[in-house]
């Protein structure tokens, strides 16, 4: 098969798992010496960095055993080529463990994307490379009529434990009671697959989470699910997500400039579109673009 056909297949998303490897092999980028020279001495000596994740967050991070695929895996492969180092991946359980691992220097960074909020910026810097939206995944036909936070009263909503969406839906539950309506039954799960399974098995009426992974889960649900609340603020405003480094780390500006290289040469757009993330793309990366975490 010709190089052009491989690229065409990858962009079309045909036979995604097999084509992913073919496209990865086709991405060959030169080292940007200026960026490599700016890396901390210990990273240059080791010739590698470790990016930590907290489990599957498709289509960004799809963790199977010790292997990770997805948009973040493709982008870190490309970043490694630009920076002239190998980027390995490690998985920990939950966001608190991820942040602790980064801040203790056990891992150099987390590419994420992780939600960037002012409160989190107190201990970490965020290199933002996507914009996100928070919506609902519901059963086909939306039998409970959930289209926004205000229509969630009296329903069962699954969320990721410890995430910003959990905080928003808990606040909405209190608002429902204040308004004389039935509270939201909030179901908190440790990971995305368990949260979406609750909806598919009809133990929950909706999963409230980031639009990008929910779009992926809906596409994998054989017509059983659909998205709703798209285009609504749903308690969030200007939600940015990105890579995480320790506060003040010199690695932050280096990663930002490396992502900018991928944006400028078209690699970023190619990978994001490959994974159906064209609506989450940023024109420029930024550091600490996040707003206030909803109360």
Image: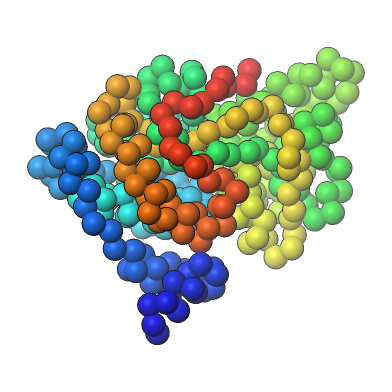
Q: Quadrant of residue 44?
A: top left
Residue 265 in sight from this viewpoint:
yes
At 49% across and 19% down in the image, what residue appears? Answer: 118
- Residue 40: where, in percent of width, then height? 17, 34
Residue 94 in sight from this viewpoint:
no
Point out the residue furthest to the bottom here.
1
Point out the residue furthest to the front here.
264
- Residue 287: where, in percent of width, then height? 41, 29
The vertical placement of 15 against 136, above or below, is: below
Q: Is residue 135 left or right of residue 1?
A: right
Location of the C terminus (image quadrant) = top right
State the residue in front, 169 or 282: 282
Point out the residue furthest to the left here.
45
At 51% across and 67% down in the image, what residue appears? Answer: 11
- Residue 112: where, in percent of width, then height? 43, 41
Q: Is residue 48 left or right of residue 245?
A: left
At 82% across and 22% down in the image, what residue appears? Answer: 176
Q: Quadrant of residue 186?
A: top right
- Residue 199: where, in percent of width, then height? 71, 48
At 43% across and 52% down in the image, what residue appears? Answer: 268
Point out the residue furthest to the right here.
180
The vertical placement of 177 against 77, above or below, is: above
Q: Is residue 66 left or right of residue 147?
A: left
State the residue in front, 106 or 229: 229
State the residue in front, 97 or 134: 134
Location of the N terminus (image quadrant) = bottom left
């Amino acid at each position: 098969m010709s190089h052009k056909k491989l690229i065409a297949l990858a962009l079309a998303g045909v036979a995604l798992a097999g084509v992913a490897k073919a496209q990865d092999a086709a991405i060959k980028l030169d080292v940007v010496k200026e960026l490599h020279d700016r890396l901390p001495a210990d990273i240059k000596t080791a010739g590698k960095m470790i990016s930590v994740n907290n489990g599957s967050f498709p289509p960004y991070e799809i963790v199977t055993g010790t292997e990770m695929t997805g948009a973040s895996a493709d982008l870190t492969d490309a970043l490694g080529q630009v920076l002239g180092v190998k980027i390995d991946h490690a998985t920990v359980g939950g966001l608190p463990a991820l942040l602790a691992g980064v801040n203790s220097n056990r891992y150099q960074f987390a590419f994420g994307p992780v939600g960037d909020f002012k409160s989190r910026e107190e201990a970490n810097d965020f290199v933002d490379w996507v914009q996100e939206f928070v919506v609902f995944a519901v059963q086909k036909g939306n039998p409970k009529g959930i289209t926004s936070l205000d229509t969630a009263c009296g329903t069962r909503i699954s969320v990721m434990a410890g995430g910003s969406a959990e905080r928003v839906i808990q606040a909405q539950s209190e608002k429902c009671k204040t308004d004389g309506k039935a509270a939201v039954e909030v179901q908190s799960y440790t990971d995305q697959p368990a949260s979406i399974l609750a909806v598919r098995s009809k133990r929950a009426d909706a999963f409230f989470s980031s639009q990008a992974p929910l779009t992926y889960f809906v596409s994998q649900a054989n017509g059983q699910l659909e998205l709703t609340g798209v285009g609504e603020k749903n308690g969030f405003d200007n939600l940015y997500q990105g890579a995480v480094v320790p506060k003040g780390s010199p690695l932050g500006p280096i990663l930002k400039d490396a992502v900018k290289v991928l944006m400028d040469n078209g690699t970023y757009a190619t990978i994001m579109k490959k994974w159906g993330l064209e609506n989450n793309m940023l024109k420029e990366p930024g550091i600490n673009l996040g707003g206030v975490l909803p109360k």
